[in-house]
Amino acid sequence: MTRPAPLWAGRTLALLGIVLVAANLRTAATSLSPVVGAVAADIPLDEVGLGILGMLPPVMFALAGLVAPRISHRLGLERFLILAIVAMTAGFVGRALAAEYSLLFAGTLVALAAAGVGNILLPPIVKRYFPDRVGLMTSLYATCVSLGTVLPPAFAFPIADLAGWRASLGVWAILALVSLPPWISVLIRSRKRSRAAALDPAPELEEPAPGMIGRVWHSKVAWAIAIVFSLTSFQAYSMFAWLPKLLVDQAGVGEFEAGLLLAFWGAIGMVASIVAPILSARLSNVGWILHIGGVGFVLGYLGLLVAPGVSPWLWIALCGVGQGIFPACLALINLRTRTHEGSIALSGFSQAVGYTLAALGPLLVGLLHDATGGWALSLILLAATSALFVYFGFVLRHPRFVEDETASREVA
């Protein structure tokens, strides 16, 4: 068994590029809502317009999952990622300069589409440049994604208060632009085939598996990972949308404490992002992560249902444990594929399916609340969908590879 090479061994630029891109993957989704009141003072925004903007993140992430694998197969991972970074920067600038809703919508759509492409490309890029450290690198970039989720809401309003909402939205273009030079340098260096072969100890994995993008739909492993991705995203989007209001109504906490509890939930998720991918790469039975995460979610939701006022911090902590499933899913994209093309295909497939179903989470939770006037059925729905993690923990407990399941379809 070969020893893993140091992270910086001939791939420092790729390491820096992965970290910077990961930090940009949620800024477009989380930087607008904190300043929407200020935006509405200059650009008319009704409830429908706000609702459309709120649905864009999972919709664009899902569409990227369908389109990005095929485009990356033609352009190459690095070239396509560079184009996505340029588009993201343009999207941020465009919506910061928007004078009407259509331009605000267009800029947001472009930025989110580019972020969706980044979602799809990062797992196979990790597999290409860090095949010996999949768990560690997935942990690193998942943590950066979490930071990109938490920081924009924290800084959006102070920046808007100081320099206006346009500066608050436009400042994230700088972070996107900073992630561009490392990948331009990597692309230039990758043209030297001898250097590229030295970076990848298994050059045979560079050979494409014909039709892998289509065959992945016939893999049981791919479907299991896609459903787990759907369920964990379902929980996350529902919590982001409704947790503060649920805590105020159900647990009787104040709005300030509800905000702190949401931040606490996010902080536990950040810790989970560090730990779960590393464990996924090291455990012989990765199903334990799904079992523990699923039980955490279920106990947390049931606590909020039957004894919400006893210890809301405990119930939110238990729900936070469940967040380890999402970064574990990101790691499984590489741990359950043998080739780069398999990783691209599985990344696109699982995220296309996952984000499509995730978009239903906030809607269903909100509809159940409106229909009943309470949160009981919403919490039962969240607990029931979380219980499925335990089942899929058994399905994914042993290493089976997507390419092996779909090999029989190669000839067809």
Image: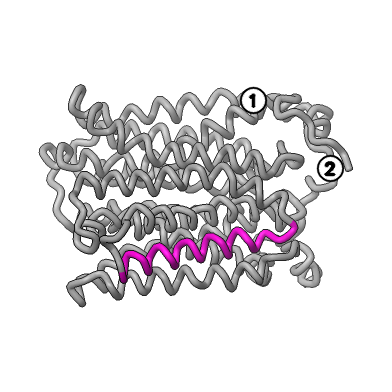
Residue 197, given in percent of the width and then of the height, sits at 82, 34
Residue at label 2? 202
Q: Quadrant of residue 40?
A: top left
Q: Amino acid at mark 1?
A: Leu
351 and 394: which is toward the camera? 394
Q: Which residues are magenta?
A: 284-306
Farthest residue, direction front: 310
Which SS class for mark 1?
A: helix
Along the viewing direction, whichever of 291 and 237 lies nearer the viewer: 291
Seen in the picture, residue 199 relative to 297 is either above or below; the reply is: above
Q: Residues within 10 Å of mark 1 (few under 14, many from 20)?
A: some
Residue 195: which quarter of the image? top right
Q: Residue at x 22, y 52 (%)?
A: 50
Dot 2: within a 10 Å radius of its alpha carbon, few (fewer than 14), some, or many (20 or more) residues? Answer: few
For this view, does 224 lie left or right of residue 21?
A: right
Q: Is residue 353 visible?
A: no
Mark 1 sits on what residue?
13
Sequence-wise, the earlier of marks 2 and 1 is: 1
Q: Gap in Å between the C-alphas at discs 2 and 1?
A: 20 Å
Residue 400 drawn at (x, y percent):
75, 64
Mark 2 touching mark 1, by CB under 8 A?
Answer: no
369 in the magenta segment: no
Which residue is located at x 72 percent, y 49 percent?
Answer: 282
For the C terminus, the quadrant is: bottom right
